[in-house]
Image: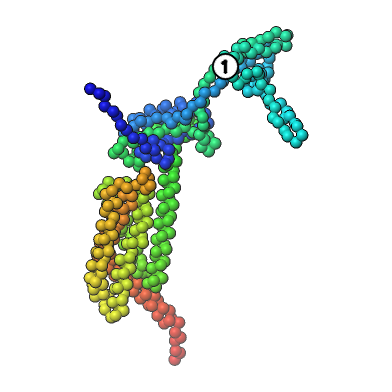
Amino acid sequence: GLPKLAIGSVSFDRNGGSNNNGIKLSLVGDSTDVLRDQSATVIAVLSRVPGLHDVRLVENSEEREIAVHIDRERARYYGFSAADVAQYVSIALRGAQLKDFRRGDTQIPTWVRFQNADAQSINDMSDYKLRAPDGSQIPLMAMVDVRTQGAASTIQRENRQTSLQIQTNLDSDTTSDEARKRIETAMANVSLPAGYRWTFGTSFRDADETGQRMMFNIIIALVLVYVVMCAMFESLIYPAAIMTTFIFSVFGVFWLFWITGTTFSFMAMIGILILMGVVVNNGIVMLMHINQLRHEGLLRTEALVRGSKDRLRPVLMTMGTAILAMVPLCIGTVQVGGDGPPYFPMARAIVGGLMFSTIVTLMALPVIYSLLDDARLWVRKVGSDGRAGRLLRQRPVASS
């Protein structure tokens, strides 16, 4: 029968790899030859790491170059120095630049070359001869060895040192974090020469820096949200009770990620950042309603029970609609820009956080409110007792 046609597709990520399921390592040192020798050892070690396959050295596209090696002994025998031979070879291959030709205010670069030098090849160098000091004609090829060799089109540098890259692809059931830990364990047993080291590719370094910046942004957002709530409640205690809903929502994020087997990523951190402005809303509305009931004369316990009962349906409706709106993104595979990071880690982070924060808002927030309110009253009592004691000690004693 007719042979079957194999159809495949190749995708390229924005970092230049063959796909977004690979890891790159860099070997850094002074000598390219030493790096190539060490890369063979590293490739052999990584090939035995579970979860990795197709471990290879990332080769740059090579170009061909002419290498001319001067035999100093033979050149000296014929009466030439190495500099004389090198100068003649340079003129033969590239020509020599003379002084610029001037015509009025115009300068014209001037070069001297052999006739038909542009059309000559390495084989034509066998016809070149040099005049020795004794007047004899010495063939150029008698003093040099000429050959062509490969040369990298680019030389990668890192901190002024040569760098070679090793790339490996990951199995479908191996995450980048798991592969990173296994690679670090395997490379701990590799002994590199002094002055040589290995690092992960820029993707991991960029991810670490991005994670640090996101953590800083989360801290700044927490501070800003807390300051705004303190100004609104005119208190430091009640906003602290509301902030606990966000802390518990983070537990909900990791709980849902554990249930669904989702890897924590940059998009998940964006989801946590979004949670900050969402999970506190129900707590703000509930505590404002409870405080309003207390101002109307209800005792704290009665206000907590009635306020929680009044806010039950609005909280469930608000969180329920928000969670249902995220379900398509949670189970979908839509990616940023079509080939960027997927949206589902962000959506699952929001859903997990909202589910936990809803439970905390309805069940734990009244308890936390009571504990912090008791702490506030205790601090106020201790402060008033201390002031009363100081006044008694300062009161003058009447003399008899």
Q: Position of residue 303 (x, y in %)?
A: 26, 75
- Within-10-Å neighbours for mark 1: few <14, some 14–19, many 20+: few
Say whether residue 373 is left or right of residue 221: left
- Relative vertical location of residue 315 with respect to residue 258 in this rendering, above or below: below
**191 or 98, which lies in front?**
98
Residue carrying label 1 = 122
Q: How is the image coloured?
A: rainbow
Q: Position of residue 242 (x, y in %)?
A: 33, 65
Tag 1's secondary structure? helix
Say whether residue 127 is left or right of residue 56: right
- Relative vertical location of residue 337 with respect to residue 324 in this rendering, above or below: above
Q: Quadrant of the N terminus?
A: top left
Say whether residue 17 is left or right of residue 156: left
Q: Quadrant of the C terminus?
A: bottom left
- Relative vertical location of residue 88 with respect to residue 375 in this rendering, above or below: above
- Relative vertical location of residue 47 with respect to residue 331 in this rendering, above or below: above
Q: Residue furthest bottom?
A: 400
Query: Residue 126's quadrant in the figure?
Result: top right
Q: Is residue 269 visible?
A: yes
Say whether residue 210 is left or right of residue 275: right
Identity of the residue drawn at 37% across and 33% down: 168
Identity of the residue drawn at 28% across and 48% down: 332
Identity of the residue drawn at 43% across and 55% down: 216
Q: Position of residue 235 (x, y in %)?
A: 38, 71
Identity of the residue drawn at 40% across and 37% down: 17
**389 or 163, which lies in front?**
163
Please state the total of marks drawn on the protein image. 1
Q: Is residue 73 visible?
A: no
Residue type at numbered disc 1: Ile
Q: Position of residue 380 (x, y in %)?
A: 37, 75
